[in-house]
Image (cartoon, rainbow, N blue to C red):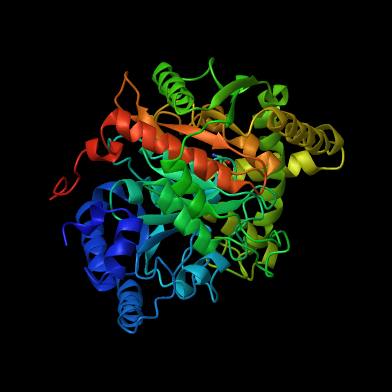
Amino acid sequence: MSDPTRRTAAELADALASGETSSVELTRAHLDRIAAVDGDVHAFLQVDAEGALAAARASDERRAAGTPASVLDGVPIAVKDVLATEGLPTTCGSRILEGWVPPYDATVVARLRQAGLPILGKTNMDEFAMGSSTEHSAYGPTHNPWDLSRIPGGSGGGSAAAVAAFEAPLAIGTDTGGSIRQPGAVTGTVGVKPTYGGVSRYGLVSLANSLDQAGPVTRTVLDAALLHEVVGGHDPLDSTSIDQPLPALVEAARQGASGDLSGVRLGVVKELTGEGYQAGVQQRFDEAVQLLVGAGAEVVEVSCPTFVHALATYYLILPAEASSNLARFDAMRYGLRVYPDGVDAPSAEEVMRATRDVGFGDEVKRRIILGTYALSSGYYDAYYGQAQKVRTLVGRDFATAFEKADVLLSPTAPTTAFKIGEKVDDPLAMYLNDLATIPANLAGVPGISVPSGLADEDGLPTGLQVLAPATADDRVYRIGAAAERLLLEKWGGPLLDRAPDLAGASA
Ligand code: GLN
């Protein structure tokens, strides 16, 4: 088979079904690609060649017996290092979890294994998923395959870069404020944040429980839908999991790719365009909207006035929840344990302090301080309480907007990929990357980022975001696939074909 790493997951699944290739062949090809390019990209924290090949052999046996476990049986995948994997280290990009090997699988991981997808390894991320560039990983940054001196987005830069660099056809990310969609936008890949509760959080190390969602990272909308159907759906182990069937996502993606869009109302969110968005990003967005209109859709301008407060709201709620979640890293239960220097028989508290001092990076400490402050008794009403009220208003703005429009559109991220080192010491500049993605997390609604083209000023990829009402994830796939097809025509093929070929770069 011609280079399997260049094929989509849907094509690989077909090739497996027809017997044209084997899972062992596909898995080997991806492991070879990782060996060739990951020294430069650093998308992976951990590669599990042995485990992946064992899973591939088992998959080939099922295919030979005519009993594949799923459509994607045998197609390899990479998993963000924030999901627990039994027997495989899980660090969350933090020193504090160095050496921790989970005794169980996250539900998402268990479903991948049940469906027969070999797990290639664990991908790099900002520490505990805090960041927009993957520079806050304790294990060093990931590099954007489009330009190795630039960031791949974050926190899930490893998953996006792995898929963009053809190291994996599929990956899993998590999105608390944009960490699937923003890396998708800046690497020219597709990322989906499902409806809150649509994909189990069991075994996903919590950043902020009320915002976190795992979802697909892929090169096409159809691949994302195929993966979403494998990992999504009700899980009794997650009390916030939605107890109803997923909509027909693959069908919606296929329909979007072929059908016309007459009768579809697209809402362009006034507050998520214009000022603050790079000119080339805005231009590609406007063109994408015009293409959708050309396919029969109607555009309405919608206003969501509270979205301008979404970032501030998020940076109270997220640190509050994170500070509480991170209390579990007490030097006793998981990973790292550091004894204070020069103290005989230190107390548990002294060991905890020494461990957390060394084990957590600056961004994590910053947010713990912010969160505990926002929750402290004298300030609770002024900060956390207020933020919760604004969160309700953001949800109401969405509800009003969805009365006028079937989906909402915006650019996914305000800029293309910036240089490594450019914003890492400026938390506010870093936080602004999630301007357009955070409202969806606050309201629990689903969103997709689809590559919308290359910005004129720097030739780097940018993304179109499509948001839909909660549980209507099928709409993001339908409109996402329609936009993808129209943009493929406009650009004369996949954007990633224009990215530099990294093989041999370091050799
Ligand atoms: N960049 C955002 C943050 O730093 C979003 C992170 C995420 O979605 N995990 O919190």
Q: Nearer the viewer, residue 176 or 400?
A: 400
Tell me if residue 96 comes above or below residue 254 in the rendering: below
Rendered location of residue 487, percent (x, y): 36, 32
Q: Which quarter shows the N terminus?
A: bottom left
Q: Residue 17, percent across and down?
A: 31, 69
Count of labels shown?
0
Which residue lies at the image location 45% right of the left edge and 57% below the top edge? 226
In the image, 63 versus 201, the foreground residue is: 63
Residue sitting nearer the eye, 126 or 408: 408
Q: Is residue 107 left or right of residue 420?
A: right
Residue pictured at 35% horizontal, 23% vertical: 455
Which residue sits at x=53%, y=48%?
Answer: 129
Vertically, is 218 above or below 458? below
Displayed quadrant of residue 285: top left
Determine if residue 179 is in view: no
Q: Give the image location of residue 132, x and y in percent.
A: 49, 38
> Which image quarter has ligand 1?
top right
Q: Quadrant of residue 108?
A: bottom right
> Is residue 127 toward the left or the right of residue 503 in the image?
right
Q: Position of residue 269 (x, y in %)?
A: 61, 24
Is residue 319 visible to the viewer in this orientation of the structure? yes
Specify whether 329 is left or right of 95: right
* Residue sitting nearer the eye, 369 or 146: 146
Q: Residue at image x 69%, y 70%? A: 236
Residue 241, quarter of picture:
bottom right
